[in-house]
């Protein structure tokens, strides 16, 4: 079904002057996602600049059963922010809703609109000597509305939690067009269901987040970054336990890097070099931070103590501690360029999984066996947030194989790795959400009880199924299982 001219004209009016775009060339940026895996079609991109306009648009769409796809920075990698090719959905971009409404240093909070870019929010927090600790490689373009709707993770989850843990209040336009004014800065509020949490990780299927009150923390002026070689992932897990105990909770990042990944980065990414003279199989990038002054807590001493304790147990083989911010950035570059470097090695099949931290070593051994049995010569490059039990289990193609032949095995390999994750009681989607990409995994790995609850929540809030239909829960799957 195409949208009639009359619908389109009314929606344009509701969004106001400069509040829409219907030129196909201008709209194309909204209709493809970063990896180019999803392409969509729409007759209209709406760009409202305030909450009332969003509400008016949604109410009209509800009355006329017009499906809506909300979009913030469009950096989600699972197709959730892209309309289908049917052309019958309107896209609502929040990018013009980018006002920072209020900062409250004593409450350690700030209220911002959904279209604020994450890096700008981080900077505003920094201006008042605070940190908004959500941090991910896409922070220069992803936006708060998208971050909350995907419950984004990133590199500081170990200490500060996911986006969910950084939220105090929300303003949401419901699928009926009603506005929920939930922008409280409260840290304690036990008045029934915690409604804001419903919208976190909902990927735009339950309403449109228009603003949020975010939790800040004191700015950590002290930081220590180390890049160490470990004998194996089991030693990395033990090192994490030592780091947690010795640092008294100051450990904020703990990232696993395999030798194969480091070689890809140093080979393909300009300016990246191996900081150690000898080659080792596995590395950990760990970081401690604190807002305490050095006379109260000397983080340099803490990092040394972590590594001394680990060395005594042969958990660390070698390592380097950054002496300043630029050295720290160089070490982080080795971790952050892993995905990019992999692109230079041909096709890569990706998994975004989590298992209990203690089971990561066993998981990695079993996963490597599965990969080799399925696609001999394929090269696993598992890396990422070991401190959260979350690994990007990426697999690069065998050197001699055609890229297209390898990528044809995507679903097959996903299926086997995700089955293994299930055996470990883990999650097949730890960070990036479900979108349109992983809906069949929902049917395979979520229980009928879980799917039934999700379907009932969706039906209660969005009975006409206008909010991002087909994302997270395709109707036929949820009905079948409920
Ligand atoms: C290079 C790169 C690195 C990344 N690293 C990480 C990482 O470390 N950790 C991580 O968690 N993710 C990561 N991501 C994924 C992505 O950046 C996050 O999911 C991010 O939170 C998405 O924000 P966005 O503003 O781009 O949202 P979008 O992509 O625009 O939207 C994401 C989903 O949320 C919905 N949505 C958007 N805005 C709203 C709103 N206001 N109300 C309701 N629903 C809405 C959309 O419909 C869609 O389903 C990375 C992506 C890239 C490209």
Image: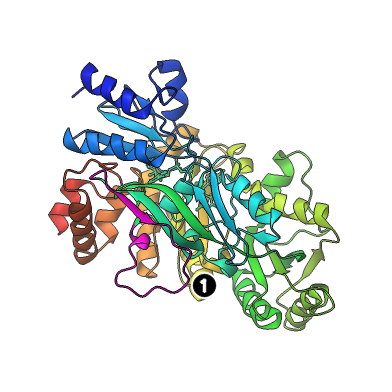
| Residue 134 position within the rendered picture, expressed as x and y whole percent measured from the top left | 57, 56
Helix, strand or loop for disc 1: helix
Q: Is 67 placed above or below 266 here?
A: above
445 is within the stretch colored magenta = no
Would residue 271 appear left or right of 218 to someone viewing this image?
A: right
Which of the two residues, 471 or 441, is positioned nearer the viewer here? Answer: 471
* Callout count: 1
Instruction: Specify start and end residues of the magenta stretch as a single range.
Output: 176-198
The N terminus sits in image quarter: top left
Q: 132 left or right of 455?
A: right
Q: Is residue 342 above or below residue 11?
A: below
Image point 33% across, 43% down: which residue?
436
Let me know if residue 184 is in the magenta part: yes
Q: Nearer the viewer, residue 200 or 270?
A: 200
Residue at the (73%, 42%) spot, across then down? 267
Task: Looking at the picture, tell me which residue is in the foreground, 90 or 183.
Answer: 183
Quarter placement of the C terminus: bottom left
Q: Kindly identify which residue carries mark 1.
A: 357
The x, y position of residue 341, in whole percent, is: 64, 42
Q: In the rendered image of this protein, does residue 304 appear above or below residue 438?
A: below
């Amino acid at each position: 079904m195409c949208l009639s001219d009359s619908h389109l004209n009314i929606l344009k009016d509701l969004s106001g002057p400069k509040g829409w775009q219907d030129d196909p060339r201008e709209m194309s940026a909204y209709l493809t996602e970063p990896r180019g895996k999803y392409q969509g079609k729409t007759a209209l991109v709406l760009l409202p600049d305030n909450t009332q306009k969003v509400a008016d648009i949604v109410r009209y769409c509800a009355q006329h059963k017009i499906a809506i796809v909300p979009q913030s920075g469009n950096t989600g990698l699972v197709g959730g922010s892209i309309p289908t090719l049917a052309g019958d959905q309107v896209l609502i971009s929040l990018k013009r809703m980018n006002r920072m409404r209020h900062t409250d240093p004593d409450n350690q909070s700030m209220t911002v609109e959904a279209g604020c870019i994450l890096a700008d929010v981080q900077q505003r927090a920094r201006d008042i000597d605070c940190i908004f600790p959500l941090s991910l490689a896409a922070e220069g373009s992803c936006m708060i509305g998208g971050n909350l709707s995907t419950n984004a993770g990133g590199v500081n989850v170990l200490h500060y939690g996911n986006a969910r843990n950084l939220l105090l209040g929300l303003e949401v336009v419901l699928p009926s067009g009603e506005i929920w004014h939930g922008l409280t800065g409260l840290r304690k509020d036990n008045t029934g269901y915690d409604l804001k949490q419903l919208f976190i990780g909902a990927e735009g299927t339950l309403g449109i987040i228009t603003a949020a009150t975010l939790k800040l923390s004191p700015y950590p002026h002290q930081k220590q970054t180390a890049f160490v070689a470990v004998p194996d992932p089991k030693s990395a897990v033990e090192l994490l336990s030592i780091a947690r105990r010795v640092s008294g909770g100051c450990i904020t990042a703990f990232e696993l890097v395999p030798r194969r990944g480091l070689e890809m980065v140093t080979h393909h990414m300009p300016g990246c070099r191996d900081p150690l003279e000898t080659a080792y199989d596995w590395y950990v990038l760990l970081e401690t931070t604190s807002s305490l002054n050095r006379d109260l807590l000397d983080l340099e001493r803490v990092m040394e103590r972590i590594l001394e304790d680990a060395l005594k147990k042969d958990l660390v083989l070698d390592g380097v501690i950054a002496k300043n911010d630029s050295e720290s950035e160089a070490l982080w570059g080795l971790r952050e360029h892993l995905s990019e470097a992999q692109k230079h090695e041909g096709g890569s099949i990706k998994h975004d999984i989590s298992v209990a931290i203690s089971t990561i070593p066993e998981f990695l051994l079993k996963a490597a066996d599965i990969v080799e049995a399925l696609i001999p010569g394929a090269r696993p490059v598992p890396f990422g947030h070991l401190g959260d039990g979350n690994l990007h289990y990426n697999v690069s193609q065998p050197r001699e194989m055609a890229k297209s032949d390898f990528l044809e095995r995507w679903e097959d390999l996903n299926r086997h790795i995700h089955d293994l994750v299930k055996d470990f009681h883990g999650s097949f989607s730890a960070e990036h959400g479900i979108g349109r990409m992983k809906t069949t995994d929902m049917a395979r790995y979520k229980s009928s009880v879980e799917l039934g609850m999700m379907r009932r929540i969706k039906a209660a809030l969005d009975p006409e199924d206008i909010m991002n239909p087909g994302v997270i829960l395709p109707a036929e799957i949820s009905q079948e299982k409920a």
